[in-house]
Protein backbone atom coordinates (compact mmCIF):
# COMPACT_ATOMS: atom_id res chain seq x y z
CA UNK A 1 0.00 0.00 0.00
CA UNK A 2 1.16 3.55 -0.68
CA UNK A 3 2.74 5.47 2.19
CA UNK A 4 0.62 8.14 3.90
CA UNK A 5 2.99 10.97 2.91
CA UNK A 6 2.50 12.29 6.43
CA UNK A 7 5.48 12.95 8.68
CA UNK A 8 3.94 12.12 12.04
CA UNK A 9 6.75 13.90 13.84
CA UNK A 10 5.69 17.17 12.20
CA UNK A 11 1.89 17.21 11.94
CA UNK A 12 1.16 19.91 14.52
CA UNK A 13 0.95 23.67 13.94
CA UNK A 14 1.84 25.25 17.27
CA UNK A 15 2.61 28.74 18.57
CA UNK A 16 6.17 29.51 19.60
CA UNK A 17 7.01 30.34 23.22
CA UNK A 18 7.73 33.99 22.37
CA UNK A 19 4.29 34.37 20.79
CA UNK A 20 2.43 33.37 23.97
CA UNK A 21 0.87 36.16 26.05
CA UNK A 22 3.26 37.66 28.57
CA UNK A 23 0.96 36.58 31.39
CA UNK A 24 1.23 32.94 30.31
CA UNK A 25 5.01 33.08 30.10
CA UNK A 26 5.16 34.78 33.50
CA UNK A 27 2.98 32.08 35.04
CA UNK A 28 5.33 29.36 33.83
CA UNK A 29 8.42 31.35 34.83
CA UNK A 30 7.05 31.86 38.33
CA UNK A 31 6.34 28.14 38.64
CA UNK A 32 9.93 27.41 37.61
CA UNK A 33 11.39 30.03 39.94
CA UNK A 34 12.81 32.57 37.51
CA UNK A 35 13.88 33.09 33.89
CA UNK A 36 13.17 30.22 31.53
CA UNK A 37 13.99 29.01 28.05
CA UNK A 38 11.79 26.93 25.82
CA UNK A 39 12.84 23.98 23.74
CA UNK A 40 11.43 23.31 20.26
CA UNK A 41 7.71 22.73 19.90
CA UNK A 42 6.46 19.17 19.89
CA UNK A 43 5.88 18.29 16.26
CA UNK A 44 3.56 15.32 16.71
CA UNK A 45 -0.18 15.50 17.22
CA UNK A 46 -3.15 17.12 15.53
CA UNK A 47 -4.04 19.88 17.99
CA UNK A 48 -2.67 23.40 17.88
CA UNK A 49 -1.80 24.30 21.46
CA UNK A 50 1.68 25.26 22.62
CA UNK A 51 3.64 22.17 23.64
CA UNK A 52 7.33 22.17 24.55
CA UNK A 53 9.80 21.51 27.35
CA UNK A 54 10.40 24.75 29.28
CA UNK A 55 13.50 24.94 31.46
CA UNK A 56 14.40 27.18 34.38
CA UNK A 57 15.57 26.05 37.79
CA UNK A 58 13.64 22.90 36.89
CA UNK A 59 11.80 21.81 33.80
CA UNK A 60 8.27 20.96 32.71
CA UNK A 61 6.66 19.78 29.52
CA UNK A 62 4.16 22.62 29.13
CA UNK A 63 0.92 22.67 27.18
CA UNK A 64 -0.96 25.96 26.80
CA UNK A 65 -3.99 27.02 24.79
CA UNK A 66 -6.43 29.90 24.56
CA UNK A 67 -9.82 28.80 25.81
CA UNK A 68 -11.48 31.41 23.60
CA UNK A 69 -9.79 30.22 20.42
CA UNK A 70 -9.78 26.48 21.19
CA UNK A 71 -12.36 25.61 23.86
CA UNK A 72 -12.31 21.89 23.02
CA UNK A 73 -8.53 21.67 23.46
CA UNK A 74 -8.74 23.58 26.75
CA UNK A 75 -11.38 21.11 27.93
CA UNK A 76 -9.12 18.24 26.86
CA UNK A 77 -6.27 19.64 28.96
CA UNK A 78 -8.50 19.82 32.02
CA UNK A 79 -9.74 16.30 31.42
CA UNK A 80 -6.21 15.03 30.87
CA UNK A 81 -5.07 16.51 34.19
CA UNK A 82 -7.87 14.77 36.08
CA UNK A 83 -7.34 11.41 34.36
CA UNK A 84 -3.57 11.60 34.67
CA UNK A 85 -3.70 12.02 38.43
CA UNK A 86 -6.07 9.05 38.75
CA UNK A 87 -3.95 6.60 36.74
CA UNK A 88 -2.22 3.90 38.82
CA UNK A 89 1.48 4.27 39.53
CA UNK A 90 2.21 1.24 37.35
CA UNK A 91 1.20 3.09 34.19
CA UNK A 92 4.23 4.74 32.52
CA UNK A 93 2.78 8.17 31.82
CA UNK A 94 4.39 11.60 32.21
CA UNK A 95 2.75 12.85 35.39
CA UNK A 96 0.94 16.16 35.80
CA UNK A 97 2.61 18.67 38.11
CA UNK A 98 -0.03 21.38 37.93
CA UNK A 99 -2.75 22.95 35.83
CA UNK A 100 -3.60 26.65 35.97
CA UNK A 101 -5.24 29.38 33.94
CA UNK A 102 -4.52 33.04 33.30
CA UNK A 103 -6.15 35.60 31.01
CA UNK A 104 -8.26 32.96 29.28
CA UNK A 105 -5.40 30.51 28.74
CA UNK A 106 -5.25 27.02 30.24
CA UNK A 107 -1.72 25.89 31.11
CA UNK A 108 -0.78 22.30 31.94
CA UNK A 109 2.65 21.16 33.17
CA UNK A 110 3.84 17.55 33.08
CA UNK A 111 7.05 15.64 33.64
CA UNK A 112 9.33 15.91 30.62
CA UNK A 113 10.53 12.65 29.12
CA UNK A 114 14.32 12.59 28.83
CA UNK A 115 15.55 12.54 25.22
CA UNK A 116 12.00 11.92 24.06
CA UNK A 117 11.38 10.65 20.56
CA UNK A 118 8.38 9.21 18.80
CA UNK A 119 8.75 5.46 18.23
CA UNK A 120 9.04 4.12 14.72
CA UNK A 121 7.67 0.84 13.44
CA UNK A 122 10.98 -0.81 14.39
CA UNK A 123 10.06 -0.01 18.01
CA UNK A 124 6.61 -1.59 17.81
CA UNK A 125 7.47 -4.77 19.69
CA UNK A 126 8.84 -2.89 22.68
CA UNK A 127 5.77 -0.64 22.69
CA UNK A 128 3.50 -3.69 22.68
CA UNK A 129 5.47 -5.37 25.47
CA UNK A 130 5.19 -2.27 27.64
CA UNK A 131 1.54 -1.79 26.77
CA UNK A 132 0.70 -5.19 28.20
CA UNK A 133 1.90 -3.92 31.56
CA UNK A 134 -0.58 -1.07 31.17
CA UNK A 135 -3.33 -3.55 30.29
CA UNK A 136 -2.59 -5.46 33.48
CA UNK A 137 -2.58 -2.27 35.57
CA UNK A 138 -5.94 -1.15 34.15
CA UNK A 139 -7.73 -4.50 33.95
CA UNK A 140 -9.74 -3.56 37.03
CA UNK A 141 -10.47 0.18 37.31
CA UNK A 142 -9.29 1.80 40.52
CA UNK A 143 -11.77 3.73 42.58
CA UNK A 144 -9.92 6.91 41.63
CA UNK A 145 -10.58 6.24 37.94
CA UNK A 146 -14.20 5.29 38.56
CA UNK A 147 -14.67 8.52 40.50
CA UNK A 148 -13.47 10.49 37.46
CA UNK A 149 -16.46 9.16 35.56
CA UNK A 150 -15.63 6.99 32.56
CA UNK A 151 -18.07 6.18 29.79
CA UNK A 152 -18.14 2.88 27.98
CA UNK A 153 -16.53 2.84 24.56
CA UNK A 154 -19.99 2.20 23.12
CA UNK A 155 -21.40 5.33 24.76
CA UNK A 156 -18.50 7.44 23.50
CA UNK A 157 -18.44 6.10 19.94
CA UNK A 158 -22.02 5.19 19.08
CA UNK A 159 -22.70 7.72 16.27
CA UNK A 160 -19.06 7.95 15.17
CA UNK A 161 -18.77 4.19 14.69
CA UNK A 162 -21.79 3.96 12.39
CA UNK A 163 -20.09 5.18 9.20
CA UNK A 164 -20.72 2.14 7.00
CA UNK A 165 -24.33 1.85 8.12
CA UNK A 166 -24.88 5.53 7.31
CA UNK A 167 -23.30 5.09 3.89
CA UNK A 168 -25.45 2.00 3.27
CA UNK A 169 -28.56 3.97 4.25
CA UNK A 170 -27.67 6.84 1.90
CA UNK A 171 -27.13 9.32 4.74
CA UNK A 172 -23.51 9.75 3.62
CA UNK A 173 -22.71 9.57 -0.11
CA UNK A 174 -20.59 6.63 -1.22
CA UNK A 175 -18.67 9.14 -3.34
CA UNK A 176 -16.49 9.81 -0.29
CA UNK A 177 -14.89 6.42 -1.01
CA UNK A 178 -12.10 6.27 -3.55
CA UNK A 179 -11.94 4.26 -6.77
CA UNK A 180 -9.99 1.60 -4.89
CA UNK A 181 -13.14 0.58 -2.99
CA UNK A 182 -15.73 -1.81 -4.56
CA UNK A 183 -19.19 -0.54 -3.65
CA UNK A 184 -20.51 -4.08 -3.11
CA UNK A 185 -18.45 -4.22 0.10
CA UNK A 186 -20.46 -1.44 1.77
CA UNK A 187 -23.14 -3.83 3.03
CA UNK A 188 -20.80 -6.50 4.45
CA UNK A 189 -18.79 -3.78 6.18
CA UNK A 190 -21.98 -2.29 7.60
CA UNK A 191 -22.96 -5.72 8.94
CA UNK A 192 -19.53 -6.18 10.50
CA UNK A 193 -19.57 -2.68 11.98
CA UNK A 194 -22.94 -3.32 13.59
CA UNK A 195 -21.31 -5.85 15.89
CA UNK A 196 -18.42 -3.75 17.16
CA UNK A 197 -20.00 -2.76 20.50
CA UNK A 198 -20.74 -6.27 21.82
CA UNK A 199 -17.44 -7.46 20.35
CA UNK A 200 -15.45 -4.99 22.46
CA UNK A 201 -17.61 -4.73 25.58
CA UNK A 202 -15.73 -4.97 28.86
CA UNK A 203 -14.86 -3.28 32.12
CA UNK A 204 -11.14 -2.59 31.66
CA UNK A 205 -9.86 0.96 31.22
CA UNK A 206 -8.57 1.58 27.69
CA UNK A 207 -6.62 4.55 26.34
CA UNK A 208 -9.07 4.94 23.46
CA UNK A 209 -6.69 7.02 21.30
CA UNK A 210 -3.53 4.92 21.26
CA UNK A 211 -1.36 5.84 18.29
CA UNK A 212 2.39 5.79 17.86
CA UNK A 213 2.42 9.60 18.03
CA UNK A 214 0.84 9.35 21.49
CA UNK A 215 3.83 7.31 22.67
CA UNK A 216 7.32 8.63 23.38
CA UNK A 217 10.50 6.68 24.03
CA UNK A 218 12.96 7.97 26.60
CA UNK A 219 16.74 7.89 26.28
CA UNK A 220 16.81 4.27 27.44
CA UNK A 221 14.18 3.26 24.89
CA UNK A 222 11.39 2.79 27.43
CA UNK A 223 7.89 3.74 26.20
CA UNK A 224 5.76 6.39 27.90
CA UNK A 225 2.08 6.61 27.02
CA UNK A 226 0.71 10.14 26.68
CA UNK A 227 -2.48 12.11 26.08
CA UNK A 228 -5.00 10.28 28.24
CA UNK A 229 -7.92 12.50 27.22
CA UNK A 230 -10.41 9.84 26.14
CA UNK A 231 -10.12 6.74 28.36
CA UNK A 232 -13.17 4.51 28.41
CA UNK A 233 -14.39 1.16 29.69
CA UNK A 234 -14.13 -1.71 27.19
CA UNK A 235 -12.37 -4.98 26.48
CA UNK A 236 -8.69 -4.64 27.29
CA UNK A 237 -7.64 -5.38 23.68
CA UNK A 238 -9.59 -2.51 22.09
CA UNK A 239 -6.54 -0.25 21.62
CA UNK A 240 -4.39 -2.78 19.79
CA UNK A 241 -5.95 -3.32 16.33
CA UNK A 242 -6.03 0.41 15.43
CA UNK A 243 -2.46 0.79 16.73
CA UNK A 244 -1.27 -1.89 14.30
CA UNK A 245 -2.76 -0.37 11.13
CA UNK A 246 0.45 1.47 10.09
CA UNK A 247 2.45 -1.73 10.60
CA UNK A 248 0.03 -3.59 8.31
CA UNK A 249 0.45 -0.90 5.66
CA UNK A 250 4.23 -1.27 5.97
CA UNK A 251 3.97 -4.97 5.15
CA UNK A 252 4.07 -6.64 8.55
CA UNK A 253 1.89 -9.69 9.27
CA UNK A 254 -0.23 -7.81 11.77
CA UNK A 255 -2.93 -10.47 11.98
CA UNK A 256 -0.37 -12.95 13.32
CA UNK A 257 1.20 -10.29 15.53
CA UNK A 258 -2.17 -9.35 16.99
CA UNK A 259 -3.24 -12.95 17.58
CA UNK A 260 0.00 -13.58 19.49
CA UNK A 261 -0.69 -10.86 22.06
CA UNK A 262 -1.64 -12.20 25.52
CA UNK A 263 -4.75 -10.02 25.74
CA UNK A 264 -6.17 -11.63 22.57
CA UNK A 265 -6.74 -15.03 24.16
CA UNK A 266 -10.36 -15.99 23.52
CA UNK A 267 -10.97 -13.09 21.11
CA UNK A 268 -12.35 -14.29 17.76
CA UNK A 269 -11.28 -12.96 14.34
CA UNK A 270 -14.89 -11.80 13.87
CA UNK A 271 -14.62 -9.58 16.96
CA UNK A 272 -11.43 -8.03 15.64
CA UNK A 273 -12.97 -7.44 12.20
CA UNK A 274 -16.02 -5.80 13.75
CA UNK A 275 -13.83 -3.26 15.53
CA UNK A 276 -11.66 -2.71 12.46
CA UNK A 277 -14.79 -2.09 10.35
CA UNK A 278 -16.08 0.48 12.83
CA UNK A 279 -12.73 2.26 12.99
CA UNK A 280 -12.33 2.23 9.20
CA UNK A 281 -15.77 3.74 8.68
CA UNK A 282 -15.06 6.43 11.26
CA UNK A 283 -11.75 7.36 9.65
CA UNK A 284 -13.07 7.47 6.08
CA UNK A 285 -16.09 9.59 7.00
CA UNK A 286 -14.00 11.94 9.14
CA UNK A 287 -11.40 12.24 6.40
CA UNK A 288 -14.07 13.47 3.98
CA UNK A 289 -14.87 16.48 6.15
CA UNK A 290 -13.61 19.99 5.45
CA UNK A 291 -9.91 20.78 5.60
CA UNK A 292 -8.80 22.29 8.92
CA UNK A 293 -6.06 24.93 8.47
CA UNK A 294 -5.05 24.62 12.14
CA UNK A 295 -4.49 20.87 11.64
CA UNK A 296 -3.44 20.55 8.00
CA UNK A 297 -2.53 16.85 8.08
CA UNK A 298 -5.54 15.52 9.97
CA UNK A 299 -7.82 14.71 7.02
CA UNK A 300 -5.02 13.05 5.07
CA UNK A 301 -4.16 10.96 8.12
CA UNK A 302 -7.78 9.91 8.58
CA UNK A 303 -8.36 9.04 4.92
CA UNK A 304 -5.13 7.05 4.65
CA UNK A 305 -5.82 5.24 7.94
CA UNK A 306 -9.33 4.34 6.80
CA UNK A 307 -8.12 2.87 3.51
CA UNK A 308 -5.31 0.96 5.24
CA UNK A 309 -7.78 -0.49 7.73
CA UNK A 310 -10.16 -1.62 4.98
CA UNK A 311 -7.25 -3.24 3.17
CA UNK A 312 -6.33 -5.11 6.33
CA UNK A 313 -9.94 -6.32 6.73
CA UNK A 314 -9.95 -7.38 3.07
CA UNK A 315 -6.77 -9.38 3.56
CA UNK A 316 -8.21 -11.05 6.65
CA UNK A 317 -11.48 -11.95 4.91
CA UNK A 318 -10.22 -12.77 1.42
CA UNK A 319 -11.92 -9.81 -0.25
CA UNK A 320 -10.63 -8.21 -3.45
CA UNK A 321 -10.18 -4.45 -3.67
CA UNK A 322 -9.53 -2.34 -6.73
Image (cartoon, helix red, strand yellow):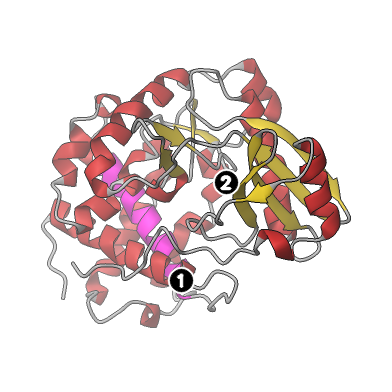
Nearer to us: label 1 or label 2? 1
Q: State the image coordinates of residue 108 (x, y, percent, origin top left).
A: 71, 42
Identity of the residue drawn at 70% across and 57% down: 72
Q: Is residue 76 left or right of residue 195?
A: right
Quarter of the figure with residue 111: top right
Inspect this view and state whether residue 266 appears: no
The residue labelled by disc 2 is 156
For mark 1, give the secondary structure: helix
Q: Is residue 269 left or right of residue 23?
A: left
The prevailing secondary structure element of the residues shown in magenta is helix
The residue labelled by disc 1 is 299
Quarter of the figure with residue 2: bottom left
Quarter of the figure with residue 78: top right
Q: Is residue 276 magenta?
A: yes
Q: Is residue 37 magenta?
A: no
Inspect this view and state whether residue 277 appears: yes
Give the residues in magenta.
270-288
Quick one: 232 or 170, which is closer to the camera?
Answer: 232
Identity of the residue drawn at 53% across and 78% down: 291
Q: State the image coordinates of residue 195 (x, y, percent, origin top left).
A: 37, 46
Identity of the residue drawn at 46% across and 71% down: 299
Q: Is residue 197 left or right of residue 157?
A: left
Amino acid sequence: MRNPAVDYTATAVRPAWDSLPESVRSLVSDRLGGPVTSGPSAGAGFSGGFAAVVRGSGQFFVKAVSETDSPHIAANYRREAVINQALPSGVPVPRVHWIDQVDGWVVLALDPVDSARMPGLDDLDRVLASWHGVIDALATPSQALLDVGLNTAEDDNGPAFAGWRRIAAGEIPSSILGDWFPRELITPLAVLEDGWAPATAGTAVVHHDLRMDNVVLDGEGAPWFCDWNWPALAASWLDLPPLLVPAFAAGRDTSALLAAQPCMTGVSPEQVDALLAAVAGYWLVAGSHDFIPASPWLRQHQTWSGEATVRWIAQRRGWTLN
